[in-house]
Amino acid sequence: MTRDLAALGGELTAMAAADHEMAVSGAAHSDDPAEQLAWRRLTARHGDRLGEIMDEVGRPTADLVGEDAARAAWLVAQHADRQLDVQRRALRLLEQAVEADAAGAREPAFLRGCTLVNEGREQVYGTQVAGVGDDGSPIPWPCAEPDRVDELRAGVGIEPFAEYVARFQ
């Protein structure tokens, strides 16, 4: 089983590396239909595999697959935008881990944002950006409590919104 888990960890980190490479290339937000399709196919394939992995082992924790692979699983769930079932399941598992003091609240906060936006609802923590304003500054998807975003972010260990979006400018 140890070797299987090591292989699983390697698979997850390879998925995240491919995801990152394509995201950095701009395919995720490209105007080119071929690049958009390539991004969608990659994230769908990865989302499908993450669903299978959750069937096999539940949440791929750092104890099971290693820290990098556990973070990779979270990233794959983040980008499974057209697979709400995968996002919801990964979020549920992460939230259960937070309740059991087996995980921090930061990663589930980001995944919650993805899930809420993909459900057409207002997000909580301002983690999802809808676009860029005329001045080049990122614009968040609508938030349920916009006046409390930084307070809510601090509660889960996320930097203030202005610091977060400064990285994208």
Image (tube, helix red, strand yellow):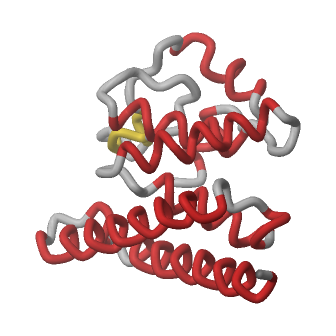
Q: Is residue 112 visible?
A: yes
Residue 165 versus residue 77: which sits nearer the camera? 77
Among the 4 quarters of the image, the one containing residue 62: bottom right
- Front position in the image: 162 or 32: 32
Q: Is residue 122 above or below residue 92?
A: above
**Residue occupying the point 45% across, 69% down:** 49
Specify whether 7 is left or right of 1.
left
Quadrant occupied by the N terminus? bottom right
What residue appears at the point 81 percent right and 82 percent down from the top-left corner? Answer: 2
Residue occupying image coordinates x 53% and y 11%: 145
Residue 169 visible? The answer is: no
Residue found farthest to the left: 33
Q: Position of residue 161 (x, y in %)?
A: 61, 33
Position of 6 relative to 90 (above/below) = below
Left or right of 163: which side holds 88? left
Q: Is residue 75 above or below residue 110?
A: below
Where residue 105 appears, as percent x and y from the top left, is: 75, 36
Snapshot quadrant of residue 10: bottom right
Rendered location of residue 84, percent (x, y): 37, 43
Q: Position of residue 59 (x, y in %)?
A: 66, 55
In the visual, does 84 lie left or right of 8? Answer: left
